[in-house]
């Protein structure tokens, strides 16, 4: 017997209803996404963008900050 024949012989109540469980999980995910957009969502995304740009160049950024602070101390 093939798998399809075995599945055809078993009652449908035994099988999981993947469509309804996927829809429920999607609805749960959509609710989580809607709740995550709080008051500071724009600030958080801006900081994440700055972090992703600056982190790979941390030595260069630190050097530029040090030079700027040194120039401010001279003036």
Image: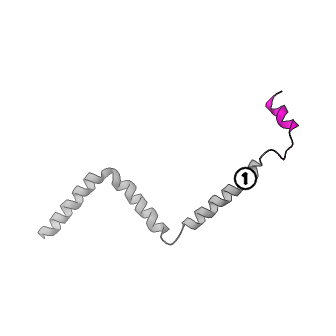
Rendered-image quadrant of the C terminus: bottom left
Q: Is residue 3 left or right of residue 9?
A: left
- Residue 15 is situated, as x and y percent measured from the top left of the image, at 80, 44
- Which residue is drawn at the image coordinates 74% and 48% (left, top)? 18
Kindly give the residue lying farthest to the bottom in the view shown.
39
- Residue 44 is situated, as x and y percent measured from the top left of the image, at 45, 65
- Residue 26 is situated, as x and y percent measured from the top left of the image, at 67, 56
Q: How is the image coloured?
A: one colour
Q: Is residue 57 magenta?
A: no
Kindly give the residue lying farthest to the top in the view shown.
1
| Structural crowding at the residue carrying mark 1, measured as other residues with C-alpha within 10 Å and reported as few (<14), some (14–19) or many (≥20) | few
Kindly give the residue lying farthest to the left in the view shown.
74
Q: Is residue 12 magenta?
A: yes
Task: Give the labeled residue for mark 1.
Answer: 21
- Residue 56 is situated, as x and y percent measured from the top left of the image, at 34, 50
How many marks the image carries: the answer is 1
- Which residue is drawn at the image coordinates 19% and 65% (left, top)? 69
Point out the stretch of residues depicted in magenta.
Answer: 1-13
């Amino acid at each position: 017997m093939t798998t399809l024949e075995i599945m055809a012989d078993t009652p449908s109540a035994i099988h999981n209803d993947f469509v309804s469980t996927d829809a429920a999980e999607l609805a749960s995910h959509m609710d989580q996404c809607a709740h995550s957009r709080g008051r500071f969502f724009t600030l958080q995304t801006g900081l994440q963008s700055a972090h992703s740009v600056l982190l790979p160049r941390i030595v260069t950024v630190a050097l530029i900050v040090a030079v700027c602070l040194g120039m401010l101390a001279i003036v």
